[in-house]
Amino acid sequence: MGQNFLQDDDLARWMADSLQAGPEDTIIEIGPGLGAVTKHLIGRSRRLILVEKDARLAASLRENCREHPSIEIIEADAVSLDLRPFFQYGPLKVLGNLPYSVGTTIMAEWLTTPSPVGHAVFMLQKEVCERVTASPRSGDYGQLTVRLQARWQASIVRHVPPDSFHPRPAVDSAIVSLQPRNRHELPVFDEHLFSHLVRLGFSQRRKQLKNVLGQLPKPWPELCEALKVTESARAEELSVAQWIELTRLSDPHPLHDTPQSAGEIFDVVNDQNQVVSQATRAEVHARALKHRAVHIFAFTPSGELLLQKRSHLKDTCPSLWDSSAAGHLDAGESYEAAVTRELHEELGLKPSASTPVFQARLDACPETGWEFVELYAVTISPSRIRFPAAEIEAVRAFPIDMVAAWTAARPQDFAPGFLRCWHEWQALAPAPAHEPAPENVRLPETSPPPS
Ligand code: SAM
């Protein structure tokens, strides 16, 4: 369990300080152990959650923290812990002097998109920190580097000698700080396809990429010209931005680059939802004209609700969580046709892959963005979800009680139109009969790799 306990109290305090947590934050410490860092975290924030796998250490922490109601102790394996309940606490401050055997796995799991983490400070083996922060064309630069740096700004903030621990580890350590990258710094990309290509590319790092990436939708020379690399390039020669560009050039989704089109034509309706004219998307939104839209709640067979995180490129409610799929009706389109189209465009589902279980109508109001909404709840058969990267950053399934707790605690995380639909659904929908899903099951999130 990598139980090398920190014995340098100044360093423990420094590490706690480096998290820069305020009174409104929720802090999670992974592997608190005997509490060397924990004691410097107490009282800094409104909630402190300690995740410890060792039953004896967890019991002793419970005993020692009895008088602190703001501390919660979770006895669990941080590798497989279900992180979805943490979204309701807002962006988390996460700290851990991680067990070295599983440190890389914990870091990758906790920082995978969509992640509830807002800032992480991890102590790890020095070599791992150097891999996380490496530059192209260096021996340390690899899959971990590219996948983390695509989403996180990583820097080594301190080196730590073995003498700082008891028992003394055989290796040097370092502390790495990870902050989310500004989404506007890099173009949008399909996360699933990106991971697939990076994994393939580094699977045989001595080989040229053209021999390991398999068949791509465009000829290799054309891709190399666009990326400005030689045709003999190896994985370590591509910068993170070039890996992202390679993903974008290989993305087969027809809408992968189109968050919305201001020129789309919608039907404008009156107070009775009767069509009176047509106008462009831009005009309808600028003049708050009443129009029509669908929202779809897609439930997994085990009764979990798929939520989508809107892309930061959306013209309305960027980066907020929303219904599984939603969209305006095109001029002349029926609500039913829009449901079929949106399920296909936004989740990649065929009409036969879903069964309607509930339907409701919502009048146009400011929360719906002056849309007359028809809300459909459907159960989807297990299938691969694929979505356009420009419209949707992530799709994730959440149990109903988790959505209820999250919407109540942080309504600001959700698009107002979704909240309006959610409250309607909660008030009117029959209680779902389903088996609880096993913990931490993730639906496949994006498009399949090109074959
Ligand atoms: N934070 C303490 C310190 O700095 O002295 C302990 C750090 S020690 C390197 C790693 C801690 O992680 C131990 O308390 C160990 O029991 C715990 N641990 C090991 N594997 C874990 C896992 N998979 N999930 C959660 N905690 C784990």
Image: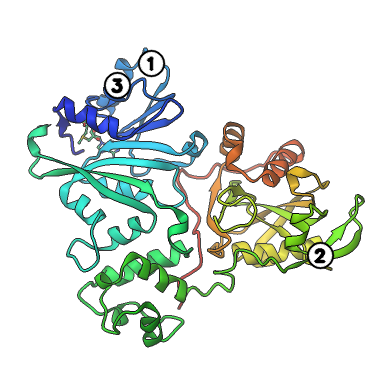
Whole-number angstrom distance, CA of label 2 to CA of label 3? 62 Å
Mark 1 lies on residue: 68
Q: Quadrant of ligand 1?
A: top left
135 relative to 391 in the view: left or right: left
Kindly state the secondary structure of the residue where label 2 is placed. strand
Mark closest to the chain's N terminus, 2 or 1: 1
Whole-number angstrom distance, CA of label 2 to CA of label 1? 58 Å
Q: Which mark is residue 279?
A: 2
- Residue 425's spot in the image, x, y percent? 73, 42
- For discs 2 and 3, the disc positioned in front in the rendered view: 2
Location of residue 358 with respect to 386 vertically, above or below: above
Residue type, mark 3 in image: Leu
- For discs 1 and 3, the disc positioned in front in the rendered view: 1
Image quadrant assignment for residue 293: bottom right
Location of residue 225 with respect to 324 vertically, above or below: below
Judge the density around disc 3: few (<14), some (14-19), many (≥20) Cα neighbours within 10 Å: many
Mark closest to the chain's N terminus, 1 or 3: 3
Residue type, mark 1 in image: His
Kindly state the secondary structure of the residue where label 1 is placed. loop
Decide: marks 2, 3 in contact (CB < 8 A)?
no
365 relative to 234 in the view: left or right: right
* Residue 102 in view of the camera: no
* Residue 43 in view of the camera: yes
- Residue 274's spot in the image, x, y percent? 92, 57
Beta carbon at label 3 within 8 Å of ligand 1:
no
Mark 3 lies on residue: 61
Kindly state the secondary structure of the residue where label 3 is placed. helix
88 relative to 162 in the view: left or right: right
- For discs 2 and 1, the disc positioned in front in the rendered view: 2
Number of numbered discs on residues:
3
